[in-house]
Amino acid sequence: MSAIVVNDLAKHFKPPKRAKRGKMGPNGPKGPRNAMGIIRAVDNISFEVKKGEIFGFLGPNGAGKTTTIRMMTGVLKPTNGEIKIFGLNAWKNQIAVKQVTGNVPEMANVYLDMSGLQNLMFIGEIYGVSKQERIKRAETMLKKFNLYEKGDLKAKKYSKGMKQRLLLCMALMTNPQILFLDEPTSGLDVQSANIIKQLIKEFNKEGMTIFLTTHDMEVANELCDRIAIINHGKIISLDTPENIKKLTQDYQAIDLHLVNRVKKEEIKNLRNIREVQENEEGFHIIVENIHDSICEIVDYIKARNVKIKHLSTHKPKLEEAFLKIIERGGKNE
Amino acid sequence: MNEESLEFSETKLKTFITQLKRSFVIAKKDLHIYYNKPPVLIQGILFPIILFIALTIGRDVQPIYVISGLMTMIIFLTSTSIGPIVFPWETARKTFERLITCPISVKTILLGSVWSTFIYGITFSSIPLIIGMIFLSTELSINLVIVISGMIIAGLAFACFSLILSVPSTDTPGNTMIFTVLIKFPLVFMSPLFMPIILSPIAYISPLTYFLDIVNIGLGDTSAFGTFGLLFDIGILLAFGFGFLFLAFVLHEKTLERRFQG
């Protein structure tokens, strides 16, 4: 059974007046524009999310991820198409749909003038949870997310990771059937990110459907059952993380660290080399034919009388596959 | 009425009651967070004090008009102090998107703002009334039913008015404050505060005039519309209140999306 069905969904924005004057901020709507200047932030996308799955939504900045999630959570009205959540039209039945879903928006914050516990009690009351039940659930959540000791402290004294954990507690206070997470681990310390990832898995095991957007490919790889890649408002790939990685099986990567310094351009000009990234230790090279490429690199190094400190090959990471798919503009679909 | 439509009405009634209850939860939160915020304190407490001093010093004002004028100014300025900052404040602090994804409508959030700002206004405007009752009880013949009814109706009407002031989709409370001062102060000066009501055509425009008249009547004055005009005052204030509320619902629904476009 599908938890979410998105059918031909589109969202178009009129350009804000200040954008016409060239004063639009970094958070303004992005996406391809038509002749009238209308921004097509989400451009007729369709997909389904199965009940009990963790569905990842990936894409670069301005791809349309947040706009899609905002339409799913009833913040923005779709220009076209519809979203069905457990068979109900999400826009027409907003209250009923919101009652069974939890949400952690990307740029959200908790109420800083309220304590962690007060934030949870407020959300519980808004969802109509009885006082006794609210107290019980708030206590359980605070303990689960390692916030119990700081529960009475005003949220303004929380670190970023603690605030994010509290936001997640707020979303889970009402035992939602679907949880929407917009960049849940973005900018967090390792401990907070690990706690959140662990708990996402735990809640999913208990049957919760999770829809998440993330820039972090490791998170997507680790957590998601399926991933949709969106760019310029269109879905360009939808598959399991493993299959997405297979899309770039022609490509392999070489990590090359040299004792002496050589120019990046010289390596890039060798045959079979697709891309060269320079890092602190040396080069990360994307190649098409691993055997020919290594021979080519070794010949070049011998000719230059340069010594190798480290050379290793590996399969492309999900991040590299993601970038390749974005580059190709979804021709793999 | 057939069984199906009866069931539909019951569902609608249940939804209405649930949303009404949730609006009180919003009000509790608004009062908890905003009662001590600088824009609220400036507009709700500092401005009435400054205006009171400016409008009464050096003038021979009768005690009855001091009480009614002060009550009118306080209830108007305090009842319109929280409403305009809730939306820009929540947008700036990034709590608004979280709130809007809760199972509540925009109308519920607006109603919550009305209740909180109403309670704030009623509380502060009671102070001059209590002072009047304690120190001027011999000079005034106070009819508490009239005065308190007037306070409740005017408090709600002004709270609804404050929602209109929060329509511009800014995330900077300071921008809203400039806009509110530009609208609120002319309305204060249009009403004949601290003097017997003389109905110049411009005084009819301001809703404050009708509350001032109710309080004057309640404090024993033979006022502009007189005792028999009490219903007229109440009717006009109710009309203002419902008009403002309806307009706020329509305008906020229209500007909501702009708050999420950066």
Image: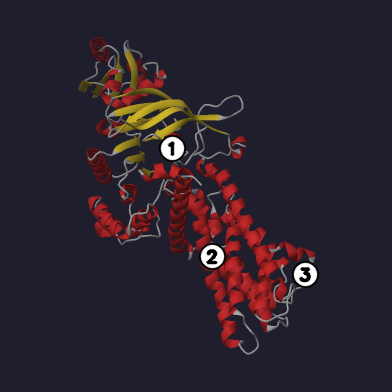
Quarter of the image for residue A85 reads: top left
The kind of secondary structure element at disc 1 is loop
The kind of secondary structure element at disc 3 is loop
Real-space CA distance between mark 2 and mark 3, rounded to the nearest whole angstrom: 27 Å
Q: Work out which residue is located at the far right of the displayed protein and give it.
A: B200
The kind of secondary structure element at disc 2 is helix
Counting labels gives 3
| Above or below A237: residue B83 | below
- Give the residue displayed 28% in from the left and 56% down from the top: A133
Q: Which chain letter matches label 2?
A: B
Residue topped by disc 3 = B199
Residue topped by disc 1 = A90
Q: Work out which residue is located at the far bottom of the displayed protein and give it.
A: B138
Q: Let me know if residue A106 appears in the view.
A: no
Q: Which chain letter matches label 3?
A: B
Real-space CA distance between mark 1 and mark 2, rounded to the nearest whole angstrom: 33 Å
Q: Which of labels 1 and 2 is toward the front? A: 1
Q: What colouring style does the render use?
A: secondary structure
